[in-house]
Amino acid sequence: MASYIFRYFEAISLGETIRLLLTAAKVDWTEECPEWPKEKPNQPFGRLPVLIERSADGSPDFVLSESSTIERYLARTYGFLPMDPRGAAVQEQLRDRQIDMIMSFRGHSTVSDSAKEEAYAKFEGLLDKMISIHTDILRENGNTGYSFGSKLSYTDMAMYSFMKMFFVQLVQYSEKVPRLFKAKLTPELVKLVTTLEADPLLSAYVSQRGSLATYVLQE
């Protein structure tokens, strides 16, 4: 079986979904945090994350960059995306919308004070739509805590990571957005969090890395 080296910063950001996928796949993997920007020229595209796949047969390493590419490669390889192209595309579009929202938030945090309210309103509109869509998906799946079927999927791990990014990491840039997010959380999304954290594939990892449920459940 292949083993992996995952290179990224010590942050949730665009790395946590990859960490969850590697853990849930039950593969041998280690994480490296390159000295930055010293190691920047040594990365394929001069950026992180980077995934290095090492084959057991000694064949050349397979190296990937770009977070979405890495996520989808792992999700397909280890069965967290369906084989059906349409089913896979449905999950991929949900992740693409999350990435759009992350970029929107970063824009909100860097604009001038006079433009912040407009940027904030745009982000809130995107958040409302995303929560509505994902809540409907969870309801249509019987409110089991999983988005599709009866087991972990790429969508579950991506959504969990997305929420954790805002509740745990990005609060340092704006406390307003995490408060807004929490006020809009639905019972279905809260159940997704608690279900993922209790899943045998990820429960030990969550215990080590810290629980998101403590943030979404606290009054």
Image (cartoon, helix red, strand yellow):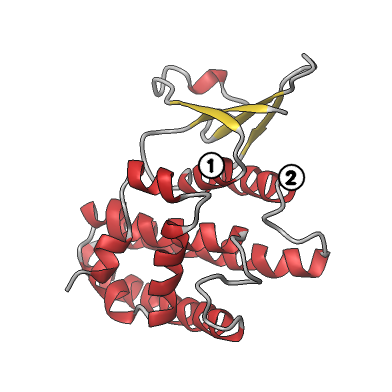
Residue shown at the point (61%, 60%) measured from the top left: 153
Q: Position of residue 91 (x, y in %)?
A: 65, 66
What label sits on residue 77 in the rendered view? 2
Direction from residue 140 to residue 116 in the image, left or right = left
Q: Are marks 2 and 1 in contact (CB under 8 Å)?
A: no
Quarter where residue 38 is shown: top left
Q: Farthest top residue?
A: 58
Crowding at dot 1, Cα within 10 Å, few <14 / some 14-19 / many 20+, comes out as some
Who is closer to the viewer here, 55 or 110?
A: 55
Residue 6 visible from this viewpoint: yes
Direction from residue 15 to residue 35 in the image, left or right = left
Quadrant containing the C terminus is bottom left
Q: Choose the circle earlier in sequence order: 2 or 1.
A: 1
Quadrant containing the N terminus is top right
Secondary structure under tag 1 reads: helix
Direction from residue 174 to residue 32 in the image, left or right = right
Q: Farthest front residue?
A: 200
Secondary structure under tag 2 reads: helix
What label sits on residue 23 in the rendered view? 1
Q: Amino acid at mark 1?
A: Thr
Quarter where residue 52 is shown: top right
Query: Compared with residue 19, is residue 177 higher up or lower down, i.e. above or below?
Result: below
Query: Compared with residue 64, is residue 25 higher up or lower down, i.e. above or below?
Result: below
Residue shown at the point (82%, 64%) measured from the top left: 85
| Distance Cα–Cα, label 2 vs label 1 | 13 Å
What label sits on residue 167 in the rendered view? none
Q: Position of residue 177 (x, y in %)?
A: 27, 68
Q: Position of residue 104 (x, y in %)?
A: 43, 63
Residue 177 visible from this viewpoint: no
Residue shown at the point (35%, 78%) measured from the top left: 185
Q: Amino acid at mark 2?
A: Thr
Residue shown at the point (38%, 73%) measured from the top left: 190
